[in-house]
């Protein structure tokens, strides 16, 4: 899988890179545009420079398990307003996980017990809102 960055005008590809060996399901940019993120369905999130293509950080959110292949497959990524935290949601009833964008360390898990399809940070960075198609 190749992650591409386009200029919206005139529509030209600025950079294409292969940061993952497995399918990618989510991408995001830090608010200042200096860091891009891509999430592989087999449990890794790569943080990279959109300018140089250099991988800045690889976060392993779960080890792929062929017997439990739905476990922690990143499907949505979002940066906090200050860019210091990247939140990772996954397919399945796993918590939204918050990681330090600088170190890749797990900061906190937000227990949801629902499938989180999409989410966003409030502008203050202290609150996360999520949506689910789970009808429980």
Image (cartoon, rainbow, N blue to C red):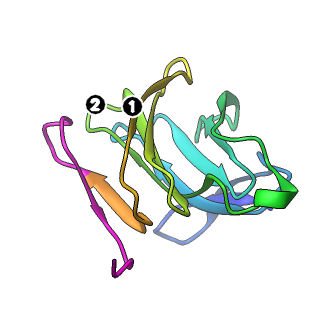
Q: Which mark is residue 82?
A: 2
Placement of 26 over or under 37, stated as above or below: below
Relative to the observer, which residue lies in front, 32 or 76? 76
Magenta segment, prevailing SS (helix, strand or loop): loop
Packing grade of label 2 (10 A; few <14, some 14-19, many >=20) is few
Q: Which residues are magenta?
A: 121-136
- Direction from residue 107 to residue 46 in the image, left or right: right
Residue at (59% x, 35% y) in the render = 49
Query: Which residue is outermost to the front?
Result: 136
- Residue 30 in percent (x, y) is at 40, 40
- Look at the image and tell me in which quarter the N terminus lies: bottom right
On screen, residue 31 versus residue 19, left or right, reads left
Q: Which mark is residue 69?
A: none
Instruction: List x then y, in percent, for residue 108.
Output: 40, 30
**Circle 2/circle 1 CB separation < 8 Å:** yes
Residue 86 locus on image (x, y percent): 43, 38
Q: Nearer the viewer, mark 2 or mark 1?
A: 1
In terms of image quadrants, where is residue 11? Answer: bottom right
From this view, report whether residue 63 is shown above or below residue 2: above
Front residue of 89/34: it is 89
**Does residue 15 show up magenta in the picture?**
no
What residue does disc 1 label?
A: 85
Residue 122 in the magenta stretch? The answer is yes
Left or right of residue 40: residue 27: left
Quadrant in which residue 83 is drawn: top left
* Along the line of sight, the residue nearer the viewer: 77 or 129: 129
Label 2 residue SS: loop
Alpha-carbon span between mark 2 and mark 1: 8 Å
């Amino acid at each position: 899988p190749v992650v591409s960055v386009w200029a919206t005008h005139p529509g030209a590809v600025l950079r294409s890179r292969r940061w993952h060996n497995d399918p990618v399901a989510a991408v995001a940019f830090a608010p200042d545009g200096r860091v891009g993120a891509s999430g592989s369905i087999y449990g890794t999130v790569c943080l990279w420079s959109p300018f140089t293509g250099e991988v800045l950080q690889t976060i392993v959110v779960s080890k792929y398990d062929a017997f439990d292949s739905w476990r922690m497959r990143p499907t949505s990524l979002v940066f906090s307003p200050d860019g210091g935290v990247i939140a990772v949601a996954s397919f399945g009833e796993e918590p939204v996980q918050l990681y330090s964008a600088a170190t890749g360390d797990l900061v906190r898990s937000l227990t949801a017990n629902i499938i989180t399809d999409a989410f966003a940070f409030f502008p203050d960075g202290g609150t996360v809102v999520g949506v689910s198609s789970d009808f429980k």
